[in-house]
Image (spheres, helix red, strand yellow):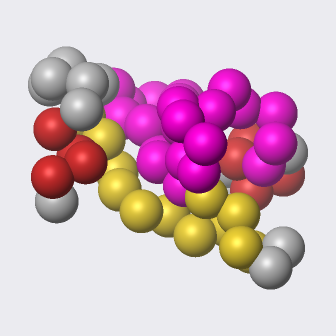
Amino acid sequence: MNSAEQYPIAWAPLDDVFRRSLLRRFPYGLIYTLRNDELLVMAVMNLHREPDYWKQR
């Protein structure tokens, strides 16, 4: 279980809508938002790439 699933508001917001949770083993982060008490994953971000590349997808 990911810590974002356990504690969704514990991660710092990226902007007004999205948050990023870091994954433990790999250099990836989950970009997610909360909607109606559900965690909606918008992107899986490679942390070695440019920080905002996922916004265009």
In the displayed structure, would residue 4 be above or below residue 43? above
Residue in the image at 25% along x and 48% along y: 55
Residue in the image at 47% along x and 46% along y: 30
Q: Is residue 21 visible?
A: no
Residue 41: give x, y in percent of width and height: 50, 64
User: Which quadrant would the N terminus be assigned to in this image?
Assistant: bottom right
Residue 51: give x, y in percent of width and height: 25, 24
In the image, the segment drawn in magenta is 8-32
Residue 38: give x, y in percent of width and height: 74, 74
**On the picture, is 19 further left or further right than 28?**
right
In the displayed structure, would residue 12 be above or below residue 44? above
Q: Hey, which residue is sitting farthest bottom in the picture? A: 36
- Depth check: give the residue in front, 45 or 18: 18
Q: Is residue 25 visible?
A: yes
- Depth check: give the residue in front, 53 or 6: 53
**On the picture, is 26 further left or further right than 40?**
left
Residue in the image at 61% along x and 58% along y: 33
